[in-house]
Amino acid sequence: MQSVHIKEVILHHTTVSLIAPFTTSFGTMVDKDVCLVEVVDESGVSGWGETVTSNEPYYNEETTATAVYILKEFLIPRLLKQEISHPNVVHDMLSFVRRNNIAKASIETAIWDVFAKKNDTSIAELLGGTQTEIPVGKSIGIQDTPALLVEKVRTFMDEGFKKIKVKIKPGADLEYLNAVREEFPDIPLMADANSAYTLNDIDHLKKLDALNLMMIEQPLSHDDIVDHRILQQELTTPVCLDESVHSLDDARKAIELGSCKVINIKIGRVGGLYESKRIHDLCLEKGIPVWCGGMLETGIGRAHNIQLTTLKNFTIPGDTAPSAHYWKEDIVTPEIVMDHGIIHVPSGDGIGYEVDQEKLSKVLISSERITEVETTHPIPSV
């Protein structure tokens, strides 16, 4: 296969607005700053990734501003002018920086895109993915009333979504989920708590068992594995880990402890496609189903999610809803669309979609071209 020699990296600073506010236990988001990372090979081929960060460090420690800083001061200087024999090696090349996984993933995924395009193939094929159709779930933010939530669910089920995920928090949980179950007794339904509960809430959370949920996602602390084991022992509802799993090693420990029965793999959270595949492979070996969670990505990040989800153990519909469900206008062409709850994996090279420069210009704040290593920090050699 042809290797990639990184000639330059372009950081495109954008602000994108959601069609409607999205509320979780963290707060409400109406827009977000996104840095789109374009990696250019010496042959002129471009690959794209994005920082799937929020404006505030509420999901994890990163923000878009900190991710850009880490990219400019540490990650890009490590990769610029280097020859990459395969995207798998990028993970180890960037391991000298601890955590900052979203920043790492933004450039690692761009390199996967370049590499796939140079070798006339898709990222899915490079990863070993075989699925050609991706079932799609819908994530619904916290609503003002249970009745409003029920109507949202009705709308999305009528559109064909294969799974409904409802954000919950104390005071907006049982009543809301009960209302949905009463109206829709058989739909695939799950709850996402985003670390809003503690072990003191065990008796309360045990009431979820009567609702036949697919899972409850990350009910306890964002950095916990041990307490989730205690909770899983008390619940028949499967516990799904999200924020607690940042690496293959985290996944291994959680599975060995019995802290979960499902794992949500987010490319940004675990540092890229290579680590995502390693976690997928471990879960496949251990009989733990996985699914791909969303981070309110633009079409670039969404396209990477689609490529990853072609792997065989992604048996649960992910949060890869069509672009039109989140953005007034996305930046990729063709638009990512859904057909009766299914996204058909594109046949093109790389991520399978192209960046629409005209649409990008509408959300672009500035672009920063980096062609030389400029940093005052010592960067380890290859």
Image: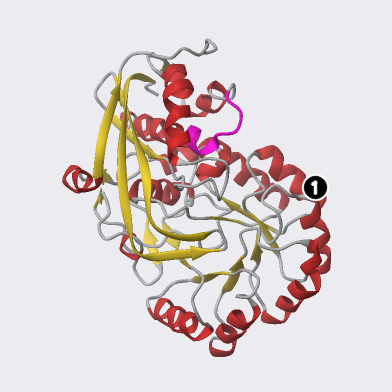
Crowding at dot 1, Cα within 10 Å, few <14 / some 14-19 / many 20+, comes out as few
Q: Nearer the viewer, residue 229 or 11?
A: 11
Q: Is residue 93 visible?
A: yes
- In the picture of the structure, the residue carrying the numbered disc 1 is 256
Is 309 placed above or below 92 here? below
Q: Seen from this angle, which residue lies furthest left?
A: 358
Considering only vertical position in the picture, is 160 above or below 87? below
Q: Amino acid at mark 1?
A: Glu
- The part of the image, by quadrant, that contains residue 161 is bottom left
Residue 358 part of the magenta segment: no
In terms of depth relative to the viewer, which is nearer, 275 or 210? 210
62 left or right of 71 in image: right
Q: Quadrant of residue 191?
A: bottom right
Q: Position of residue 124 (x, y in %)?
A: 43, 44
Q: Nearer the viewer, residue 68 or 286?
A: 68
User: What segment carries the magenta color?
Assistant: 97-104
Position of residue 350 measured from the top left corner of the image (x, y, whole percent): 34, 39
